Amino acid sequence: MKILYAIQGTGNGHISRAREIIPLLQKYGELDILVSGTQADVKLSQPVKYQLHGFSFIFGKKGGVDHFKTWLSMNLFRFRKDMKQLQLKDYNLIVNDFEPVSAWACKLQGIECVSLSHQAAFKSKKVPRPRTIDWGKVILSHYAPTKYHIGFHFDRYDDFIYTPVIRSEIRQLESKNLGHYTVYLPAIDDKRLVKLLVQIPGVKWQVFSKHNKESYQEQNVFVEPVNNEKFNKSLATCEGLFTGGGFEGPAEALYLGKKLLVAPMRFQFEQQCNAYALKQFGLPVIWGSTRNWLPIVKKWVEQPQNHQFNFPDETAKIIDDMVKKYARI
């Protein structure tokens, strides 16, 4: 059996989940990997057959998407060329993690593919989302169209939605509390974060920055570039995680029993939905309209947070069921 696994390369969540899923897919046959997009700090250990430009959202430094840089990075001519050149008829199964080139190539060639992603969960009307009009809704629906859907979310909102894929390296960590707080907000410049966090003395902050290549310390705030191993260690031993409105990061913190505070990116509809869902569980959120973050962060540090999430390890079964149901033999 020949399988194509197409992965979105924007952000770390898709690649992190893929690292867990790739070995499982390889058990069923010959696996080719396609990655499009940029902005991921986590890398795959397996060879990538197709490395495409795709479409990426560029993180800004003020809490949102950098629309200008995102627009500059887009290349419609290259996207159309890659889509037409991608030959998919020889694959028995095409699995798509919110990757647009292969999704539209399948549509062009009349080939069925299945989405296996967090974004696939939004095909259900039962998934919590704010009642707003947002251009992001259109992108979420048409960015990587597929016929079949297997989604992941914080809860099983529908019969095709499962709880998050927690990486084995996270499941194997010993969770303990050494008192510090871990911070990962890729759409905010570390200088802005330092200015905020030094106002809460007596707390040790470990900030992982996407915008700085050198480690440094300012008072009680330690800043260093994003590093997967160091971040995992920091997360496993922290009291809480202060992060964006992504999916995998918050899910891993909840799995480890950590306090959680999220600040979803402005102009990013999916993150707004994730934060809205977490709000339903009673977890704190800093929305884009909030001007003064300090009182919310102080309150989060000072108050305990009690939550219990059950994220069972069922990835192997999900993959097995998917192959049996959707593979063309």
Image (cartoon, grey):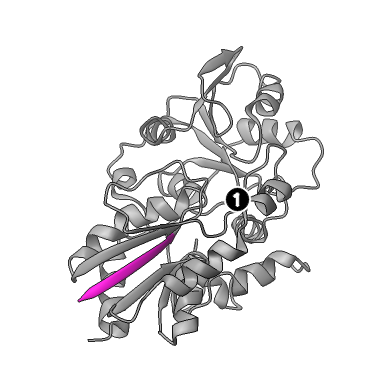
Tell me if residue 137 comes above or below residue 310 in the rendering. below
Q: Position of residue 34 (x, y in %)?
A: 37, 61
> Is residue 16 shown left or right of residue 132?
left
Tell me if residue 14 comes above or below residue 298 in the rendering. below
| Label 1 Cα crowd, 10 Å radius (few <14 / some 14-19 / many 20+) | many
Q: What amino acid is at disc 1?
A: Gly
Q: Residue at x 70, y 42 (%)?
A: 63
Q: Quadrant of residue 275?
A: bottom right
Q: Let me know if residue 71 appears in the view.
A: yes
- Asked whether 114 or 236 is in front, the reply is 114
Mark 1 residue element: loop
The C terminus: image quadrant: bottom left
Q: Residue at x 30, y 44 (%)?
A: 169
Q: Position of residue 173 (x, y in %)?
A: 31, 39
Mark 1 sits on what residue? 245
Q: Position of residue 313 (x, y in %)?
A: 30, 60
Q: Is residue 242 magenta?
A: no
Tell me if residue 243 comes above or below residue 251 in the rendering. above
Q: Let me know if residue 308 appears in the view.
A: no
Task: Find the magenta span and give its range.
Answer: 1-7
- Asked whether 303 or 80 is in front, the reply is 80
